[in-house]
Amino acid sequence: MDFTASLALIAPEILLSVAGLVLLLAGAWMGDGASRLVSYAAVAVLAVCAFMVAPVLCTAAMGPDTVAFGGQFRADAFASFAKLLIYAAGGAALLVAPAFFERHGAMRAEYPVLVLFAVLGMGLMVSAGDLLTLYIGLELNSLSAYVLAAFLRTDERSAEAGLKYFVLGALASGILLFGMSLTYGFTGTTAFEGIRTALAGGLSTGALFGVIFMLAGLAFKIAAVPFHMWTPDVYEGAPTPVTTFFATAPKVAAVGLTMRVAMDAFGTQASAWQQVIIFAALASIVVGALGAIGQVNIKRLLAYSSINNVGFILIGLATATQAGASAMLVYLAIYVAMSVGGFVAVLMLRDADGEAVEAIADIAGLSRTQPLLALCLAAVMFSLAGIPPLFGFWGKFVVFQAAVQADMIALAAIGIAASVIGAFYYLKIVKIMYFDEPADKAHGKSDWIHWALLAVSAIFISPLGYLLTRWLGSLADKAAAALLFAA
């Protein structure tokens, strides 16, 4: 494939790069007063990028025509599925940010620019066909994320979150790089296709260590146990719009990248990494469920919920089958909607002075002071718990179904049993909102953008979401997951 064709395949990434630079200059020239305008322009850029990648997914594009720069970049249907979720999550994080930061006098034009560059890095991650592309995308995303976590400079918690994320992220990057160097040393190539071919004849001890170290580095990015320790502190300390972003877009990118690495590069040696993934899945489900029970801050509770949900997603990866990969993508789509809805609802919990209400005890009796907000938040909690007929049940169902089809009945049974633990703290939130005496704290007003995002999320996770199951399953299975097993 010639250079011009390769450039055409990376058109969304070029647009993000150019738009990020242009908006950075616009913010410098017009000042922070133009921050809201820059944010809306960034949302428009993400919308254009979504229109650019959607046809690739709809046509189930795969094969040599989707490979750019000698195999380093893949603009295929799998990448497009992940990118659409990333763009949607990034757009939501941009839309809810101005109102939040303006109340703190901290809205600056750098925020939407950092989000665009983080999204650019995530696009490279899910399209990576080479270890070098993988690392460039990962670091571009991470460097933007470190700044975003510490964006609220007047808040000590935000500065602490940024520092913790940076230190632990640097450690994870070192582990990942060490695994990449071992993999390269024992396979003689950095290309996923070359690694797959080299490992087809067997896995040496050195290459096995490379696989383990790479998966450990990626486990940090998806916040899987035992590399989850940063998640509650960063989610609580970072500004809530940033937490909304962290809980959705980077999670999709990291899970997509992990699927690429495990099922593509290391696909011929699935037995070597399945045990690691099974342990991480079960540990994440249990630790996420138990860790959330004693939380008094709703953002920390949602952080442990994120860890818990990663465990369910990893059950699909542990099957090492196309059905498992498809189930992971379906779960991710539903999880993004649930997380956006949950954190937008948290953003709308404010007192009369506009200050955030994050203590779980302070939302007591919310159903009597803000019944519509309480109803939407309750729907999110029921959906996260996987209680039918809400759409969150379908995500868990397809993952457990894939596990049963792969004869991993014990894994599915343990996952189902552990999900009951998680239901406890979700239902506790509903009980506090509907049955406790009103705390009369969360009664601040919200703008129409927050209500619109919350309404879209609530409708998607409602029983109406089941109307999309056939369409979503087809895109996830026949278009996106199929190409991981096409070799």
Image (spheres, grey):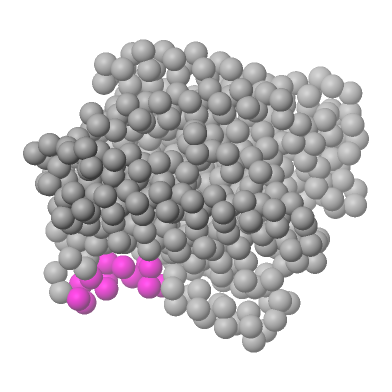
Asked whether 254 or 183 is in front, the reply is 183
- Give the residue at x 56% y 16%: 420
* Whole-percent x, y for residue 204 in the image: 17, 38
Left of 62 or right of it: where is 218?
A: right
Question: In terms of depth relative to the viewer, which is nearer, 342 or 374?
Answer: 342
Q: In this orientation, does residue 457 appear?
A: no
**What segment is highlighted magenta in the picture?**
3-15
- The image quadrant where one finds the N terminus is bottom left
Q: Residue at x 86, y 42 (%)?
A: 443
190 or 450: nearer the eye? Answer: 190
Query: Where residue 372 appears, x then y in whole percent?
Result: 74, 36
Q: Is residue 381 left or right of residue 142?
A: right
Q: Residue furthest left?
A: 201
Residue 51, position as x, y percentages in the image = 39, 61
Question: Can residue 13 be found in the magenta stretch?
Answer: yes
Asked whether residue 282 appears in the rendered view, the answer is: yes
